[in-house]
């Protein structure tokens, strides 16, 4: 009579090879689906802004003619709409008055903008503009340094899957060193059109 080692009673026998293959493929498939949902922004929002978002920042005079408006490109490359819940913007040498979103329809910046107060929705695979209204406290910025930063709290807009809200930081709203700024001056402030220092251009437009 064959003796059974007591340890064999504690360790389960290995499953047949076909069963192990099915379980292995199932695990790999679930991991792939989860990675795709996260990578394409279905669970975790992945907006792009500023240099990575494409487009050129636009600076102009607000309708009240007592403040300036900076339009910064914002894109949502994911397949789902995202909600911009709030935005904390810092513009060195200036006082930020309010921040809103202008959804591009048709695509591309427009001036004056048609801002939507936060929270605002940006559709999947769509672009928008971050609308920042400010008043300069100084009239000159170091043209070799990036200007401005923003922290956006965003969530995915859907009902079926859980949304993991997150804070996304963008450390450079205007790259003054490359001259990547389009200035749209009002009548009487034409000289501001050639300025690439955002504070200098804002002061010139407000003084016109």
Image (cartoon, rainbow, N blue to C red):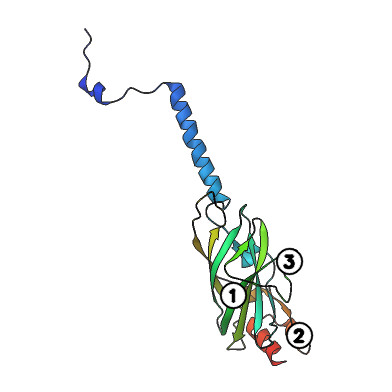
Which quarter of the picture shows residue 189?
A: bottom right
Query: Whole-percent x and y of residue 200?
Result: 65, 86
Q: Position of residue 115 (x, y in %)?
A: 66, 72
Q: Secondary structure at mark 2?
A: loop
- The residue identified by callout 2 is 186
Estimate the spatial distance between the alpha carbons at disc 2 and disc 3, rounded to whole Å: 20 Å
**Marker disc for residue 108:** 3
Mark-to-mark CA distance, 1 and 3: 18 Å
Kindly indicate whether the residue at mark 3 contacts the one at mark 1 (C-beta within 8 angstroms): no
SS at circle 3: loop
- Please tell me whether mark 1 sits on a helix, a strand or a loop: strand
* Picture layout, residue 207 above or below residue 30: below
Among numbered discs 2 and 1, the one appearing first in the sequence? 1
Give the residue displayed 58% in from the left and 71% down from the top: 172
Q: Would you place residue 182 above or below residue 81 in this image?
A: below
Name the quarter where the C terminus is drawn.
bottom right
| Quarter of the rendering containing residue 132 | bottom right
Residue shown at 49% from the left, 59% from the top: 165
Residue 175 x, y percent position in the rendering: 63, 73
Q: Nearer the viewer, mark 1 or mark 3?
A: 1
Query: Quick one: label 2, few (<14), some, or many (20+) residues within 10 Å?
Result: some
Residue placed furthest toward the front: 159
For the residues marked 2 and 1, what is the alpha-carbon distance in whole angstroms?
22 Å
Q: Name the residue: 73% across, 77% down.
A: 112
Where is mark 1, residue-wise?
A: 99
Is 120 or 74 nearer to us in this picture?
A: 120
Question: First in sequence: mark 1 or mark 3?
Answer: 1
């Amino acid at each position: 009579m064959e003796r059974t080692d007591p340890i064999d009673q504690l360790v389960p026998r290995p499953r047949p090879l076909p069963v192990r293959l099915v379980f292995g493929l199932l695990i790999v498939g679930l991991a792939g689906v989860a990675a795709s949902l996260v990578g394409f922004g279905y669970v975790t929002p992945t907006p792009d802004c500023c240099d990575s978002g494409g487009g050129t920042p636009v600076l102009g005079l607000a309708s009240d003619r007592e403040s300036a408006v900076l339009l910064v490109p914002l894109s949502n490359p994911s397949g789902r709409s995202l909600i911009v819940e709030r935005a904390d913007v810092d513009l060195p040498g200036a006082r930020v008055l309010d921040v809103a979103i202008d959804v591009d329809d048709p695509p591309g910046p427009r001036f004056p903008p048609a801002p939507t107060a936060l929270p605002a929705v940006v559709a999947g695979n769509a672009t928008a503009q971050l609308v920042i209204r400010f008043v300069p406290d100084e009239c000159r910025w170091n043209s070799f340094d990036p200007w401005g930063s923003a922290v956006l709290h965003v969530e995915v807009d859907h009902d079926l899957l859980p949304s993991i809200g997150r804070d996304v930081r963008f450390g450079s709203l205007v790259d003054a060193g490359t001259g990547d700024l389009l200035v749209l001056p009002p009548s009487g402030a034409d000289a501001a059109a050639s300025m690439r220092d955002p504070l200098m251009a804002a002061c010139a437009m407000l003084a016109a």
